[in-house]
Amino acid sequence: MDEPTYYRTATYEAVPEDVHRVLLLYSGGLDTSVMLKWIQDQYAAEVVALTVNLGQPGEDYDVVRAKALRIGAIDCHVVDAREEFAADYVLPAIRANGIYGLGYPLFTALGRPLIAKLAVDYARRTGCDTIAHGCTGKGNDQVRIEATIATLAPELKVIAPVRGWRMGREEEVAYAREHGIPVKGGTESAPYSIDDNLWGRSSEGRWIEELEHAPEPDVFELVTRPEEAPDQPETVTVEFEHGVPVALNGERLALVELLERAGEIGARHGVGIVDHIEDRIVGLKVRDIYEVPAAAILLLAHQELEKLVGTIHQNQLKPMLDQRWAYLVYAGLWWEPLRADLDVYMVAANAQVTGTIGVKLYKGSARVVTRASPYAVYDPQLATFAESGGLFSQAASPGFIELWSLQSRMAWRVRDDDGR
Ligand code: ARG
């Protein structure tokens, strides 16, 4: 391995003199385990590990903590942040119908600012001068994490060893073996790059980088493959109060449990598989395979209910603001004041988003089949019978049409025959 060269591009980057005690965002995987040891060696610094539970399935946090301590962390904190994540990050995303690039429900983008905020809290609490993370130099996550730290804690410095250490997987495995760091899987089986939480799971790498390669079955660990999903469809009802999902199939649930339950039901029916080409903020276009069963049900239901209770004017504006919201979050600017401004609007626009939507799930598809809301801007009598209700007169339509088409008719008249 080459001797690392230290140079500073941004003001918040650490040079070795700054680094005495490091708060490491630790997942227990290969990169951050190698980092844990590498930082001690390269910087002669102490390392405090922090592992954040955002509801990623199948983690054993006792094992993660024991591993960190074994590799030399002076302490390892495990934080269960599921409730905060659900209430303060996923819920605003639901209100804003948060989707980037027509398919990505932002689960990683929502998780990073919270993880980085917790890193700041724990760094301050444990007397660290520097925060270390395991992101590469090619992705969005480095942006989200470092922008958060630089915004919330100008006094803290950042190191991102993976960005500069020029070790590939093989060198990392060798380094790990040499330093007694346990390695899962071995050298030969380069795994997918996975990130997951309550709101979804992403896979990158291997054949996913070949655009002509259709998904291999082994990538799907959360969602049942649609062709193997039950032959019987299932309709799930989602009840909202002011834009907040509060019950599934009539059963009231706390948000974390509701998200988990919706994810299980969707996953069983093969719902929420997204094969996504994505424009990253760092310029690259990449392909991600997403499994987002909870979002596939809840965002669909929320959007449908919102459309039912909103006026035509509200329904035309909100998607534009939703898109701005999603882009800010995707682009790592969670702390940007415009996002908070937009959230005020999102809350206001969700005041009437109360009611119940039925979604039918069947072999990979999710389709709205029933709608009910006391705030629906909908009168079944107006829709069927002409003069009832006193709000609408069919006789008024010709007058409306005359005025509505006035300028178009005038313009047509003063132009050539084809209207140009
Ligand atoms: N492409 C998605 C995003 O930019 C998912 C990133 C997943 N992160 C990861 N380290 N595997 O938000």
Image: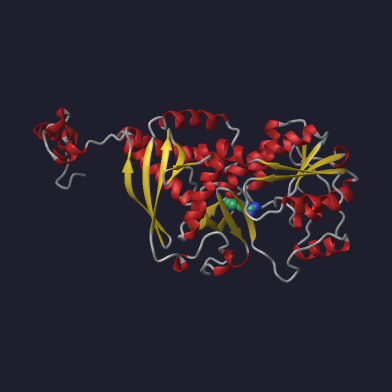
Who's the residue at 38% across and 31% down the image?
352
Residue 335, horizontal then vertical, whole percent? 60, 33
Above or below residue 145? Residue 234 is below
Q: Quadrant of residue 311?
A: top left
Q: Quadrant of residue 131?
A: top right
Q: Quadrant of the N terminus?
A: bottom right
From the viewer's side, name the closer residue of 358 and 410: 358
Would residue 179 be seen by someone viewing this image from the given angle? Answer: yes
Above or below residue 280? Residue 311 is above
Q: Is residue 408 left or right of residue 192?
A: left
Residue 119, horizontal then vertical, whole percent? 73, 39
Q: How many marks?
A: 0
- Outermost residue on the left side: it is 395
Who's the residue at 63% across and 66% down the image?
206
Q: Is residue 169 left or right of residue 18?
A: left
Who's the residue at 57% across and 57% down the image?
286
Residue 76, horizontal then vertical, whole percent? 80, 44
Q: Is residue 110 left or right of residue 307?
A: right
Would residue 96 be seen by someone viewing this image from the given angle? Answer: no
Residue 204, horizontal then vertical, whole percent? 61, 59
- Outermost residue on the front side: it is 251
- Outermost residue on the bottom side: it is 188
Q: Quadrant of the C terminus?
A: top left
